[in-house]
Image (tube, rainbow, N blue to C red):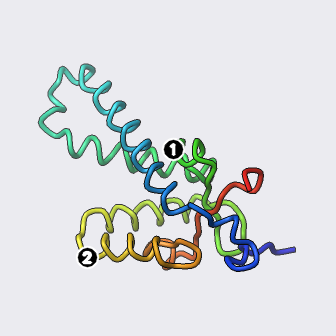
């Protein structure tokens, strides 16, 4: 039996405050990956400081893919009680976690898609950003947290 995503009108509690929680989770996850990047520097004899933005970006991609593929949420999302779901209501498949991470990285590195994605998250009934709309994913409050 296929499950579906909660309806944003009938089950509004699943989407309540999700956009703000996504923003806070992003800050938490950015701090975690930043600290990990700094902790790696001594193991490179501090040479990696010359490519620190690339090191940070690479760690961020690996961190997001690994956590989304395994738990359907990053640690920041988990702390705030939210998680990703696919269009059929199931947790993220690894391929979707990879595509979502790449889509998110694209929006972070380009101004207009970033603005559009943030506006969509704030205004869309399900709080979906650009990558979410393209992939059919959504972030909801964890069922046990509603």
Q: Are circles 2 and 1 on residues that touch, CB within 8 Å?
A: no
In the picture, measured across the screen, residue 30 lies left or right of residue 82, that is left
Q: Cα distance, mark 2 to mark 1?
A: 25 Å
Mark 2, residue position:
112
Which mark is on residue 90? none
Which residue shows up at 67% across the image and 76% down it? 8
Which residue shows up at 25% across the image and 76% down it? 112
Residue 46: image location, x then y, percent: 17, 24
Which residue shows up at 62% across the image and 56% down it? 83
Which residue shows up at 32% across the image and 24% down it? 39
Residue 124: image location, x then y, percent: 51, 79
In the picture, measured across the screen, residue 118 lies left or right of residue 20, that is left
Which quarter of the rendered picture does the N terminus lie within? bottom right
Of the pair 20 and 117, the residue shown nearer to us: 20
Residue at the outermost left position? 50
In the picture, measured across the screen, residue 88 lies left or right of residue 96, that is right
Crowd around label 2: few <14 · some 14–19 · many ≥20 (10 Å): few
Crowd around label 1: few <14 · some 14–19 · many ≥20 (10 Å): many
Residue 128: image location, x then y, percent: 51, 73
């Amino acid at each position: 039996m296929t499950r579906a995503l909660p309806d944003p009108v009938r089950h509004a509690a699943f989407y309540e405050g999700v956009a703000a929680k996504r923003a806070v989770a992003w800050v938490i996850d950015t701090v975690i990956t930043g600290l990990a990047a700094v902790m790696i520097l001594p193991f490179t004899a501090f040479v990696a400081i010359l490519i620190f933005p690339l090191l940070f970006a690479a760690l961020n991609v690996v961190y997001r893919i690994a956590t989304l593929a395994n738990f359907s949420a990053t640690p920041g999302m988990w702390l705030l009680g939210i998680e990703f779901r696919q269009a059929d209501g199931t947790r993220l498949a690894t391929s979707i976690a990879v595509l979502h991470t790449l889509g998110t990285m694209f929006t972070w590195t380009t101004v207009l898609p970033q603005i559009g994605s943030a506006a969509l998250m704030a205004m869309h009934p399900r709080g979906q950003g650009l990558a979410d709309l393209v992939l059919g994913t959504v972030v909801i409050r964890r069922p046990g947290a509603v």
